[in-house]
Amino acid sequence: MDFVTSSIDESYLTSATSMLSLSISHALSKLGTYLMTTAVETKTPLPPPPGPSLWAGLTAYKRDPAAYMHGLFLEYGDVLRWRGFMTIHMLNNPDHVRQILTQAHPEFTKNAYDYHVLAQTLGKGLVTNDGSDWVKQRRLMQPMFHNKIVNTFDQVINAFTAVLAERWNQLPADRPVALDREMSRVTFQIVAGTLFGSAIDEHADEMVDILDAININTKTLRAFFTLYPWIPTAHNRRFNTVMRRLDHIVYKIINGRRVAGVANKDLLDRLLSARDEPTALGMEEKQIRDEVVTLMLAGHETSSTALQWTFYLLAQHPEVEAELLGELNSVLNGNPAAAADLSRLPYLKQVVQESMRVYPPVWGIARRATNEQEFAGYRLPAGAYISILPYSLHRHPEHWPEPERFDPTRFSPQRSESRHSYAYIPFAAGPRTCIGAGMSMLEIQLVLAQLLPRFRLRPVPGHPVSPMATVTYRPRDGVKVFIEKR
Ligand code: HEM
């Protein structure tokens, strides 16, 4: 009994002790949890970036979106949030840009509104594609854009430019000429001629119109409806007609090449003869169509815009034009430049670089964050829409003194040396950098080198030159010029 009693007592004691120790440990654990919770609570969660709503500056935005957004960076700093139809996070620090485009690029995809709109036209071509499909296609096409191959395009570029020069030669000096049309045609002929052979030539004018209509569509509000092409708006009906015509021409070209046989060794051949490694299957017809349309659109409007702005800037800055002419005349002696001559024309390259700094043909680059991100102490949620604006980076006051001044010598080797490499990104950067960067630099320089020594372009007085931000940043009503022979 005693034993029982004592045992009861003992067990009571034991259980009392264990109860006590349980309560102590419970209390301790509660205290721990409390302390931890308090610690978490006292760690202030990162705030979202500052920034206005779209409605606050709608009029200024509509006038010139790029200039308006640049103003926001000057007001709010390099990380800001812009609340409109959707919230867009805008970043203007070259370190952040490097992070997004290069260092952490898989975390920033192209699953963004701009690319959904573009995909209406481009399908899953290289610009709009993502993930492993994109890797496969980029790997396939990259060799065609290797410098060794691109440099052999110089003769085709010069030949199309010579045809243009011949036409300009016949023009009376007092007839106003729409430079956008002239440049679009020649850059389209160049991209089509170098990458797809001559089959597109007969459709050049119509294709320029079609691609132009598509480009403008992408930055109007009506583009939203083209995401749902079955909605019977008048705009959608027009858009669908344009798309049908575009497809008809492109499929005709693809089928024509299939029938004629693959022998030109151009990009179209490469697309047609590509085989998937494990399956040995060829590329689907629709994928070939998407790549062709992508290269035609991405490859001509951008270079055309750069050429227009360069001619315009040169006309505004006669001292730069005179220096450039001096260089061209002394090196080329009236001949067109070959690719190999460009290393002896450093000022020509600087002029083109500076023109694309002031007026970057692709003024905005969009991305979407796959997970939560932190930039400069601000939190960007998973799924955040991100915008990087070459237009603004190229005017960043910390990297570009007197940013509005057109001064090609900024790109002299001495002055470029210490500059942040992500403060200048007309062709973007990182794995998704422009595949045609080398080609377009060659093209723009060769066209200028041939035309400038022969013609002086004078902007028509009174014709307004104001920028319009579509996919490209281009003169709204083009640049109108009188073309005089030198
Ligand atoms: C002055 C001329 C040009 C400029 C300023 C320019 C600019 C750019 C920029 C900024 C991007 C990146 C877009 C993004 O990530 O959202 C890009 C991509 C691209 N560009 Fe260009 N481009 C030019 C000429 C060309 C030419 C001549 C071609 C082809 C013939 C071309 C084909 C492409 C393609 C296919 C891509 C997508 C690359 C990829 O994601 O793998 N571009 N370009």
Image (spheres, rainbow, N blue to C red):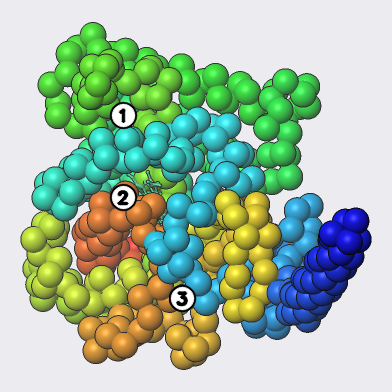
Q: Cβ(mark 2) to ligand 1 < 8 Å?
A: yes
Coordinates of residue 354 in the picture (x, y in percent): 38, 74
Spatial distance from mark 2 to mark 3, Cα to Cα?
A: 24 Å
Instruction: Examine the rendering and report whether any part of residue 385 can be seen.
Output: no
Residue drawn at x 24%, y 72% as measured from the top left: 348
The yes-or-no answer for disc 3 within 8 Å of ligand 1 is no
Neighbourhood count class around disc 3 (C-alpha, 10 Å): few under 14, some 14–19, many 20 upward: some
Badge 2 or badge 1: first in the primary sequence: 1
**Quick one: label 2, few (<14), some, or many (20+) residues within 10 Å?**
many
Q: Is residue 178 above or below residue 379?
A: above
Q: Residue furthest front?
A: 1
Q: Amino acid at mark 2?
A: Gly
Q: Which residue is mark 3?
A: 95
Image coordinates for residue 35, horizontal then vertical, percent: 78, 79
Which residue is disc 1 drawn over? 201
Q: Residue at x 46, y 17 (%)?
A: 248
Q: Callout 1: helix, strand or loop?
A: helix
Q: Which mark is residue 436?
A: 2
Marks 3 and 1, the one that precedes in the sequence:
3
Q: Is residue 279 visible?
A: yes
Q: Which mark is residue 116?
A: none
Q: Tell me which numbered mark, 2 or 3, is placed earlier along the sequence.
A: 3
Which quarter of the picture shows residue 82?
Answer: bottom right
Q: Are marks 2 and 1 in contact (CB under 8 Å)?
A: no
Say if 358 sits above or below 341 in the image: below
SS for callout 2 = loop
For the N terminus, give its image quadrant: bottom right
